[in-house]
Amino acid sequence: MSPEMERAHQALRELVSLRSGGTVRDSRRAYEVWVEQFPLPAETVVAEWEFGEWVRTPSSAADRVVLYLHGGAYRMGSPATHRTLMAHVATAAQAAVAFADYPLAPEDPFPAAVDFARDAYVSLLDRFPANRVAVAGESAGGGLGVALLLRLKDEGLPLPAAVAVNSPWMDLACGGDSMALRAYRDPMLSRDSLLAAAGEYLAGESPLNAYASPIHGDLTGLPPLLVQVGTEEILYDDAVALAAKADARLIVVPDAPHVWHYFSAWLPEARDALRAMGDHILAATR
Amino acid sequence: MSPEMERAHQALRELVSLRSGGTVRDSRRAYEVWVEQFPLPAETVVAEWEFGEWVRTPSSAADRVVLYLHGGAYRMGSPATHRTLMAHVATAAQAAVAFADYPLAPEDPFPAAVDFARDAYVSLLDRFPANRVAVAGESAGGGLGVALLLRLKDEGLPLPAAVAVNSPWMDLACGGDSMALRAYRDPMLSRDSLLAAAGEYLAGESPLNAYASPIHGDLTGLPPLLVQVGTEEILYDDAVALAAKADARLIVVPDAPHVWHYFSAWLPEARDALRAMGDHILAATR
């Protein structure tokens, strides 16, 4: 493992350590403090959006948008935790990023996040043709993005032109073999912590509900989908299963931990992941 | 499946049809005729090399080289079948391509190809530092490339800086589940035809020999390795097993058949594959 990749593992261990112990409010705040090590790139323009915020860079085309759905196990994540990453996504995809600040559990359990993502997406269709809209996300937000696609299909709404997810959480029952097989390699997530977060989010709903665990949905007929995952993730099987069922392009990144794309400041594989995401979106929205 | 991807499947069915029936000499000739549909890009410079030929384009740096090992089940393939593809590889990797015209079965069975690849690689080290040398290949040539790495490790020779293989044939016993599971989706290869070619190549040697079936070798400590494979391949499991054992970057391309990267003239996924190969080589040989 390269020193940079080892540093990514260490940074995630620190994040887990910072977040442990306190209330969910403490965890959210600790996440925001941790992320301050990644400063916002110069010339990033941030603006209010009724569903979150806009993030644009000098590379952002006026007529291309990425609806981004953040991770955080449906209980954390905010504009503050993701603004720098959104700037990198905006540059990679040559697009405006519409960051969805969706409601979190335990205050707002399922299906609040799905409803919110649906409404945020539909609002974008007032301003952009669907063939210039992409959906992207990571971890819980990757699962939420695929759940959004299922919802759009069910409602007969226009689908986005491209979807790109990193380290998606597709199965809230956490049934993948990698939950055990990669447990000792994953510096960040544990099955127990995921199941605890799933319990709060589901609030009694079945984890088999495809809007919560979209691996159980009909994943045919989706737009071009790019799935990226690290080998050091208990969510590895979630990504591989999604790629197989949705006929997606899959990129497996050796040694990478969960959401390694955060570390583009110093991790080459993170820059690769952002470039792959951007290229995928660009190719489908030109 | 896109019309372009369907065309790739059709083109491979035609190749199989053209090659079937005659002697191995007829098959080789049919392959060369089939490939004439892909004209050499303008400004390609081809020169003799004692182990095959050099292919350069205006993008080729003077001090970076890709040793390319072609496919053809160890019984076909020549400069004529690969010159156009080599020009695209040269451009993508910004390198000279050293195309290895290794001896073929049945005339020259195992280990002639491995010995030849080893000697060709060593000769490149007289002209390039190892950190500017990459090895690439497809199908049988992908397996041969990994076998070459095992040989270099065993001899204590300097390894190349990067390796990139598409649709590699890693197991000459053809034991992967995809041999059956994807048999009806693969427009080109069948387990029977692969086993027949393996028999001629092995000429009595065990398919468990790691220089013939490198999936059985010690795949730790290799240079950065990129593996690309299509979902419509009976060799799918060969690629996935290689990526897992060698801790490689894996790209799975939906709907793509065997050696889809041949079709960059009109297939976007082929251009993607060449770009990924080139980017991977560039990142490791700068």
Image (cartoon, coloured by chain):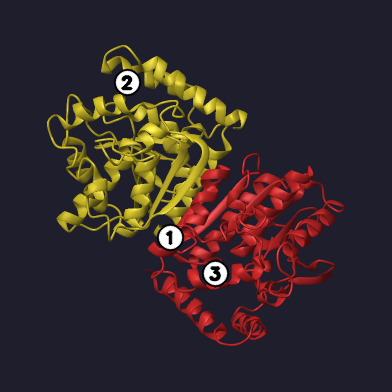
Chain colours: A red, B yellow
Residue under the point 84% across and 56% down: A123
Q: Are marks 2 and 1 in contact (CB under 8 Å)?
A: no
Q: Which mark is residue A190?
A: none
Q: What is the chain identity of the residue bearing mark 2?
A: B
Q: Which residue is mark 1?
A: A178
Mark 3–mark 2 distance (CA, rounded to whole Å):
56 Å
Q: Earlier in the sequence, mark 3 or mark 1?
A: 1
Tell me where residue A211 appears, x and y as whole percent.
Answer: 67, 55
Q: Which residue is mark 3?
A: A194
Amino acid found under the numbered disc labelled 2: Arg
B180 lies above or below A73: above
Left or right of B57 on screen, residue A117 = right
Q: Which mark is residue B28?
A: 2
Badges 3 and 2, same chain? no
Amino acid found under the numbered disc labelled 1: Ser
Q: Are marks 3 and 2 in contact (CB under 8 Å)?
A: no
**SS for callout 2:** helix
A14 lies above or below A84: below
Q: Quadrant of residue B81?
A: top left
Tell me where residue B221 appears, x and y as whole percent.
Answer: 28, 61
Badges 2 and 1, same chain? no
* Residue lying at the far right of the rendered structure: A126
